[in-house]
Image (cartoon, coloured by chain):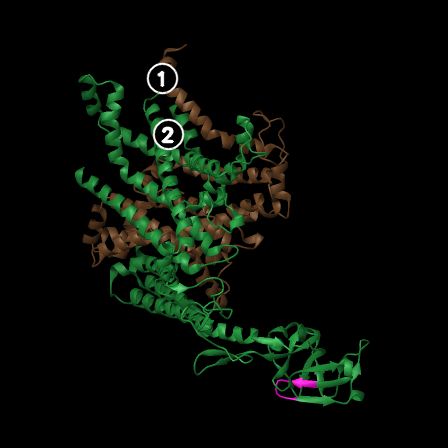
Amino acid sequence: MKKWLMQDSWRHLIGISISLFALFPLYLVVISSFASSGSLQLTSFVPKEISFKNYQLLFNNPAIPYLTWAKNSLVIAGSVAVLSVIIGSASAFAFSRLAFKGRKTGIQLLLLVQMFPAILAISAVYVIMERVYKFAPEIGLGTQPGLLLVYLGGAMGVNIWLLKGFVDSIPAELDEAAKIDGASAVQTFWLIFVPLAAPVLAVVALLSFIGTFNEFILARLFLVDMENRTIAVGLQQFIGGQYSQNWGPFAAGSILASIPIVIIFLSLQKYIVSGLTAGSVKG
Amino acid sequence: MMYFLRGKVAFTLKIIVISLISAILLMLTQSAFAQREYVIAAFLGLTVLVLALTYLTKISIPLKFFIPGILLLTAFVIGPILYTVTMSGFNYKTGNIISKEEAILQIKARGIEADPSGISFDIKLGRFDGTEAILVSDIANLKYFISTTSSRVAIDPREVTLNEYGVAISAPNFKALTDSELANADKSYSKRHFIYEGEYFIALEGFEAGVVSRQVLEYVPSTDQFKNLVNGKLYSDNGRGNYSLPSDATAILEPGWRAPIWFENYSKIFTDPRVREPLVRVFIWTIVFATATVLTTFALGLLLALALNKPIRGRRIYRSILVLPYAMPSVMSILIWGGMFNTEFGAINALFGTDIAWFSDPNFARLAVILVNLWLGFPYFYLISSGSLQAIPSELLEAAAIDGANSRQIFRKITLPLLLQILSPLLIASFAFNFNNFNLIFLLTGGGPRNELDGEIAGATDILISYTYKIAFGSSTQDLGLASAISLIIFILVASISLYGLRKSKVLESFS
């Protein structure tokens, strides 16, 4: 046996066994997605067949508008990511760089508001949007723009908080120089700060995208129509409700939906970890 | 770019954008006002004003940055929180959902009684002299009449046209409703009292039959009471959202309305054993669950971080594999685990050759919940522990080694205490997060198993937040008032935990 293996064998033992623990469910999903049986059954560790039936079902079955769900998820999560970062970074910039009365109180209030368990305000959000629907059916309950607005409001607290941490870490010398040159605060924000912070803003936008993509409870409450649903809601309906225990297509759909998220996550690992240590925990 | 932000072009653009947004908001304000949603209308109106003041004057520069965020937060976070606070002071549950005015109308509508002899007639809906009327056929006596809400006109049997069942379908001056009119008749005709005799009137039962009925409950506006016209009993407002008999508080009229009961929802939590006992059980499990999750995820994450803290072969591969559970969309991984724990087909039982009914036995269900959360959460602690391990100065460890400490002693006396100090705010944050980990419980076990025969809504794996959700949106009864009160208590608990954690991190900052 090689020397390195002897020396570090306990490390590899732990690494391998926990890797197996991490991979087991994922491996199971992958083989289920290529099986034709449709259950999440463990018949053998080696797949006996490779069938694309489940994948075909996702794209060819008119009762399963998978592509529409994917588009909905992309549009909703994408808009939330972009808009919430623009709006949030403006607030974060002001908190971090501008001197004004009530700054400290504002930050504390924001922190407190952010701690209210969002799920518990759902009944109130529901009642409010139900009322909005009565006079503006385009943005009320059951519509994607309505859900988007609710997400934007909900994302504000966390995003401003997260962005403020990032903004604080960007040196202020450049905007001070701009100020001396006679630039207004608004100009400094758009011309100096935004280009400088663009990579960070992109990271926060992607985190926001992942978070919204994962959101399930509000989306389920809001999007009743089959055509309106997001991937998370649509796929959940596969294994409960009318498609009861339909694991094959669920597995296939989950894999396709997870791949981009996992890729984004892995490539941004470094930033996400620093964001995590800033105090946020992903769900 | 500079040109855009400075010159007249920018100013014009700004004006256009602000007027456009204001126009849309004003339109919404108007329609909200028309629908009598005064609070929403006021908010929208105020928004227009604030936007104009902020962006067209130079009142405050910071406000220009804050306004969009503040408006969104107010509308969708602070507004709902305030609404929750308000709801917690109301008797707001199934049976007491509507307003008092609506409740009075409904009690009146329900407070009628059919004639004891059970007379009913075949009828035809239509119009007579332009008002809503019914053409009534008393087939047994071969009598026909037209009745409106104010008069009754007898008709000569020779003047009516009968169908094959002997029901009059047309009469002079009577215009029967067309099919399309009939489709919309439900709201108007079914609420009308068509004249019959004395106190009796004809109430519709469907569109083709009328029942002779009389009003039993009558509203007395002067004293705000309902009077039972038959036995003379008086029902008065009991101050808790119902009309009830002063002598018998349980004799209430349905439906009730949402009435302020101030702190009763809160006091109920502590004094009513039917509320308190399940809540205490759920609270204990919530603490156990959150603590167990933090301990297990941290322990496994740390173990990994220690094992991979040396540049061994394949470290990058391990790392990529180990963060996968954290990178996967959690909704999907939770659902997958749910399938794996299935008793008959699940992979867990197949793998270990067991036959455990995971989600039917309270203890196995709890174990499953913690296990799944371990899978979801350990990569987080692996990532942050390995980051923190590198932050511990190597001189410290070397000095200890020179002093003759073995690696176990170094870990226990130096590495672990330092690590705990660095990570304690994150451990607390993780506790606070899992305290409210709704998705996991809701998607994995739904809070079950529970004893449904007892009508119990708290399940063995329900945590406070999922239990509260069930109180508010349960399938049989919904108690928004009580749920809101519990929500606010949870909020206070979580906020104190998090603020404590934050204090700790501040203390650390000032040290370094």
Q: Please say whether residue A192 is visible from this viewpoint.
A: yes
Query: Looking at the rendering, in which quadrant would you find the C terminus of chain B?
Result: top left
Could you say whether the residue bearing mark 1 is in a helix, strand or loop? Answer: loop
Q: Quadrant of residue B199?
A: bottom right
Q: Please say whether residue A81 is visible from this viewpoint.
A: no
Residue A200: percent from left, percent from top = 33, 43
- According to the picture, the residue beneath numbered tag 2 turns out to be B300
The question of residue A122 being in magenta is answered with no
Residue drawn at x 49%, y 67% as measured from the top left? A134
Query: In the orientation shown, which residue stands out farthest toward the front?
Result: B247
Q: Nearer the viewer, residue A232 or B95?
A: B95
Residue B418: percent from left, percent from top = 23, 31
Q: Chain of mark 2?
A: B
The range drawn in magenta is B146-151
- According to the picture, the residue beneath numbered tag 1 turns out to be A8
- Which is more foreground, mark 2 or mark 1? 2
What kind of residue is marked 2? Leu
Query: Looking at the rendering, in which quadrant would you find the N terminus of chain B?
Result: bottom left
Up-down: is A124 above or below B109?
above
The question of residue B149 being in magenta is answered with yes
Q: Residues within 10 Å of mark 1 (few under 14, many from 20)?
A: some
The CA span between labels 2 and 1 is: 18 Å
Identify the colour of chain B in the image.
Answer: green
Q: Chain of mark 1?
A: A
Could you say whether the residue bearing mark 2 is in a helix, strand or loop? Answer: helix
Q: Nearer the viewer, residue B369 or B322?
A: B369
Q: Quadrant of residue B180?
A: bottom right
Residue drawn at x 44%, y 49% as measured from the top left? B466
Identify the colour of chain A in the image.
Answer: brown
